[in-house]
Image: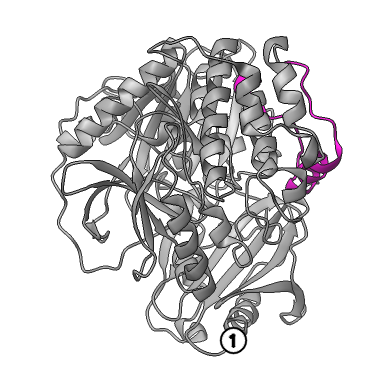
């Protein structure tokens, strides 16, 4: 959970907004308080959807249907305003980590917990299907583990985005590839049986820690969903008999939610359905909510609200940042007593420095805290700003540069060269140490390790090496990733005045009307779908999305399977938004380095 920023709205309808919970492909989720004191999870729809009249019509229809869902294992929709300038939907707020976060933090669930999960999910789907809805995006992040059972969230929303939203980058498929059904992967008509297939995938993940299908790219993953046999080798036999028919390729062969409930039979009564470690996460989140509700509201600013386009996983959906909110910092030295700050060749927390730094080179062949020499075993990871290191002793360190961070189970802050270090623990098994970036306080330099002492030592080592590194850790020549996207576009190109707003290190937005966006990224090299367009010697693809348009192209091949890409989005209140996006592309090409 993060404090609202000065320019963020403080009210949506009758709900007072107090904190940011996270983001998904369709919108931003905020913690709100109703006039009667009840808490709500309020989702604000992203602007690109709000500008699409067809989306608003579908959204209104799906909200009306979802408000009829009232099952015990769903987070009921309380209120909505599909006609607001920023459409929103408010659901009952419940505390609990998502299934994804719980399994990542505490490991696979025991068999009895998987059975309870299956009962809750089948009951929720029966209620969702009863009112004529299909969830369409049943995934580990959309299932919360609360103190008395699971809760399914975000039902009835995915359909509103069909036909005009670029959520997955694979051509309009709405859903999560690892957990969608074969018919959904092939964009065929869906029935409630599609959700049952997703339920089977969730149970595999809950029981084993991974999904039933693997793939190094989205395209390969989707192919395996459609054609491959699911990997159930690690699934306990007690639940495998249930999971197998759910994952049948033929929708007609899958059981209905009621058949699943009949198969499972009654569940023994109990007040703690999950392992103790999961209930500890629930307790930590409840404490975090109490802290957030005590925060003083920051003064509003005249700047327009900021939003982000991509979902950033919020660890366990909440974070305890009481120490930061209180402003009482307990200093824990990362550097040794009396250590001198080295001559500042580079600012290790500046955006310019971090954009050009390869995280897999910073801590390579370095010994931290007596753990042994660190190696970077996976340098082909698509996330250019993260690298996982491992020592021969078994110790591991993850380094993240300029990424968003979330505080869970806040610890007394540390101190590095006079800057406060944010410390938090995840599931009692790892610790994150973060230096905030002065220019973007929501971003930081973060190290993740088994203990806070080790994480702080690694952070100190990383910061010192970046400062003294000069060009030792630079990305290769020809890379566009070190560039500031906001500095490369002339406002007149998009019919605007003034510079854009940097939302991440390599994401720039021009909000208002017309709107535009420019993103530099390194991702799996999957061909983009759309119409070819010549930008002056460079072939790109363009795709119209209602009143907006997306133009993308590959700048350079970074590794065998990863490439650097450029993505431009443009919206307009009149004319063809693709004309604006193509004009931006043509003006930008000459300013990019030669690959």
- In the image, the segment drawn in magenta is 206-234
Please name the residue that numbered disc 1 is placed on. 576
Q: Position of residue 403 (x, y in %)?
A: 47, 44
Placement of the N terminus among the 4 image quadrants: top left
Mark 1 neighbour class, 10 Å CA radius: few under 14, some 14 to 19, many 20 or more: some
User: At 25% from the left edge and 35% from the top edge, which residue is drawn?
Assistant: 418
Tell me if I can see residue 102 in this picture. Answer: yes
Q: Is residue 28 magenta?
A: no
Left or right side of 91 for 569: right
Q: How many marks?
A: 1
Left or right side of 556 for 569: left
User: At 50% from the left edge and 49% from the top edge, which residue is drawn?
Assistant: 311
Q: Position of residue 234 (x, y in %)?
A: 73, 15
Q: Residue furthest bottom?
A: 575
Judge whether 428 appears above or below 327 on screen. above
In which quarter of the view is residue 518 placed?
Answer: bottom right
Q: Position of residue 477 (x, y in %)?
A: 67, 56
Judge whether 93 appears above or below 188 on screen. above
Q: Secondary structure at mark 1?
A: loop
Q: Position of residue 579 (x, y in %)?
A: 61, 85
Tell me if I can see residue 504 in this picture. Answer: no
Left or right side of 22 for 359: right
Judge whether 263 appears above or below 53 on screen. above
Q: Nearer the viewer, residue 53 or 482?
A: 53
User: At 44% from the left edge and 57% from the top edge, which residue is drawn?
Assistant: 63
Q: Nearer the viewer, residue 145 or 267?
A: 267
Q: Nearer the viewer, residue 562 or 354?
A: 562
């Amino acid at each position: 959970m993060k404090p609202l920023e000065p320019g963020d709205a403080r009210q949506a309808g009758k709900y007072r907004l107090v904190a940011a919970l996270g983001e998904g492909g369709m919108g931003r989720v905020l913690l709100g308080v109703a006039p009667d004191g009840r808490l709500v999870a309020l989702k604000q729809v992203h602007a690109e959807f709000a500008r699409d009249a067809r989306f608003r019509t579908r959204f209104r229809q799906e909200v009306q249907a979802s408000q009829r869902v009232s099952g015990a294992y769903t987070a009921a929709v309380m209120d909505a305003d599909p006609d607001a300038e920023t459409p929103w939907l408010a659901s009952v707020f419940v505390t609990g980590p998502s299934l994804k976060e719980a399994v990542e933090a505490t490991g696979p669930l025991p068999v009895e917990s998987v059975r309870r999960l299956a009962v809750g999910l089948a009951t929720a789907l029966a209620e969702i299907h009863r009112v004529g809805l299909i969830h369409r995006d049943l995934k580990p992040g959309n299932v919360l583990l609360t103190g008395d059972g699971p809760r399914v969230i975000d039902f009835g929303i995915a359909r509103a985005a069909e036909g005009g939203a670029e959520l997955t980058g694979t051509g309009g498929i709405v859903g999560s590839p690892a957990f969608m059904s074969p018919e959904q992967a092939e964009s065929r008509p869906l029935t409630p049986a599609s959700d049952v297939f997703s339920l089977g995938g969730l149970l595999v993940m809950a029981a084993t820690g991974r999904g039933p299908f693997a793939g190094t790219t989205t395209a390969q993953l989707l192919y395996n969903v459609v054609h491959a046999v699911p990997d159930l080798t690690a699934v306990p036999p007690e639940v495998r008999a249930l999971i197998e028919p759910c994952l049948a390729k033929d929708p007609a062969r899958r059981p209905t939610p009621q058949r699943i409930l009949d198969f499972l039979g009654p569940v023994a009564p109990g007040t703690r359905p999950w392992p103790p470690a999961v209930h500890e996460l629930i307790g930590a989140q409840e404490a975090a909510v109490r802290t957030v509700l005590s925060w003083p509201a920051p003064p509003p600013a005249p700047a327009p609200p900021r939003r982000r386009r991509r979902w950033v996983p919020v660890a366990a959906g909440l974070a305890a940042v009481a120490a930061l909110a209180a402003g009482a910092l307990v200093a824990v030295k990362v550097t040794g007593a009396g250590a001198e700050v080295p001559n500042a060749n580079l600012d290790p927390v500046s955006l310019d420095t971090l954009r050009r730094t390869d995280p897999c080179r910073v801590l390579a062949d370095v010994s931290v805290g007596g753990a042994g020499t660190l190696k970077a075993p996976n340098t082909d990871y698509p996330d250019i700003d993260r690298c996982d290191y491992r020592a021969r002793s078994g110790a591991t360190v993850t380094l993240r540069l300029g990424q968003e961070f979330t505080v869970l189970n806040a610890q007394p802050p540390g101190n590095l060269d006079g800057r406060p270090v944010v410390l938090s623990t995840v599931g009692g098994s790892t610790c994150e140490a973060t230096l905030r970036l002065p220019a973007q306080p929501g971003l930081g330099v973060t190290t993740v390790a088994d203990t806070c002492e080790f994480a702080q030592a690694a952070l100190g080592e990383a910061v010192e090496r970046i400062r003294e590194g000069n060009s030792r850790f630079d990305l290769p020549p020809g890379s566009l990733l070190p560039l500031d996207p906001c500095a490369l576009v002339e406002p007149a190109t998009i019919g605007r005045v003034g510079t854009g707003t940097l939302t991440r290190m390599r994401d720039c937005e021009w909000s208002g009307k017309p709107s535009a966006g420019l993103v530099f990224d390194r991702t799996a090299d999957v061909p983009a779908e759309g119409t070819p367009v010549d930008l002056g010697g460079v072939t790109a693809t363009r795709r119209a999305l209602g009143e907006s348009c997306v133009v993308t192209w590959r700048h350079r091949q970074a590794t065998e399977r990863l490439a650097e890409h450029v993505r431009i989005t443009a919206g307009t209140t009149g004319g063809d938004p693709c004309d604006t996006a193509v004009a931006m592309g043509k003006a930008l090409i000459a300013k990019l380095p030669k690959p």
